Amino acid sequence: MVYYQKMTPEGYQKIKNEIAELKKDRPRRIKILQEARALGDLSENTEYTEAKRDLGHLQSRVRYLEKQLKYADVVDKTADGKVDLGKTVTLKFDDDDETEKYKVVGRMEADIADGKVAFDSPLGQAIMKKEVNTTVSVMAPAGEYHVTIMAID
């Protein structure tokens, strides 16, 4: 069974950009490896070992990101008035009356510090497909809390 990873068009593009940057850096890392190899005895050559490790990490990251793109399910925003992937929601946290904005994104894009919440996180699951003025319970690891959807952009 193939598992497709939901993501926004912006998240897909961000991964493509990272792959391009890594591929652009690859020749520089290969040159460093070649220069380190030319220093001689490979068994005691820390420069060679580090350069080989760094190049391996770069290539591994590229493979990982390319696999993410291969299995990406890019979801465009809908205009149905409900919380969905790619939309920005304003939420009022009922326990402290504060409001915060979050963009609902795929798991790979999630970054709560940057205002991006994964659609399959406890908060994301609670608000998905809900409309403005809906209050939902969020079952989080730290306990249950309630949020009200104030706006959907």
Image: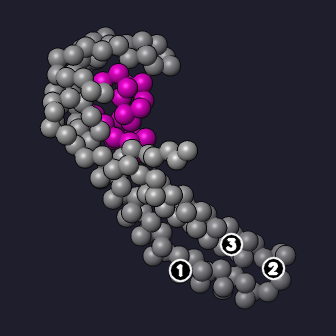
Assess disc 3: are there few (<14), some (14-19) or many (≥20) residues with their C-alpha within 10 Å of its C-alpha.
some
Image vertical order of residue 26 relative to residue 132, above or below? below
The x, y position of residue 105, in whole percent, is 34, 40
Q: Helix, strand or loop at disc 1?
A: helix
Q: Residues under labels 3 and 2: Cα distance?
A: 11 Å
What crowding class fits label 2: few (fewer than 14 Cα within 10 Å), some (14-19), or many (20 or more)? Answer: few
Q: Which residues are magenta?
A: 101-127
Residue 146 rendering spot, x and y as whole percentages:
32, 13
Mark positioned earlier in the residue sequence (3 or 2): 2
In the picture of the structure, the residue carrying the numbered disc 1 is: 28
Residue topped by disc 2: 42
User: Image point 81% across, 79% down: which residue?
Assistant: 42
Relative height, residue 61 to residue 141 (above, below): below
* Residue 102 highlighted magenta (yes or no): yes
Residue 3 can be seen, yes or no: yes
- Residue at (15% x, 37% y) in the render: 79
Q: Residue flagged by tag 1: what amino acid is it? A: Arg
The residue beneath circle 3 is 52
Label 3 amino acid?
Lys
Q: Are marks 1 and 3 in contact (CB under 8 Å)?
A: no
Secondary structure beneath dot 2 equals: helix
- Looking at the image, is mark 1 or mark 3 earlier in the sequence? 1
* Residue 111 position in % (x across, y down): 39, 40
Q: Work out which quarter of the rendered image holds the C terminus and state it.
A: top left
Judged left or right of residue 6, residue 40 is: right
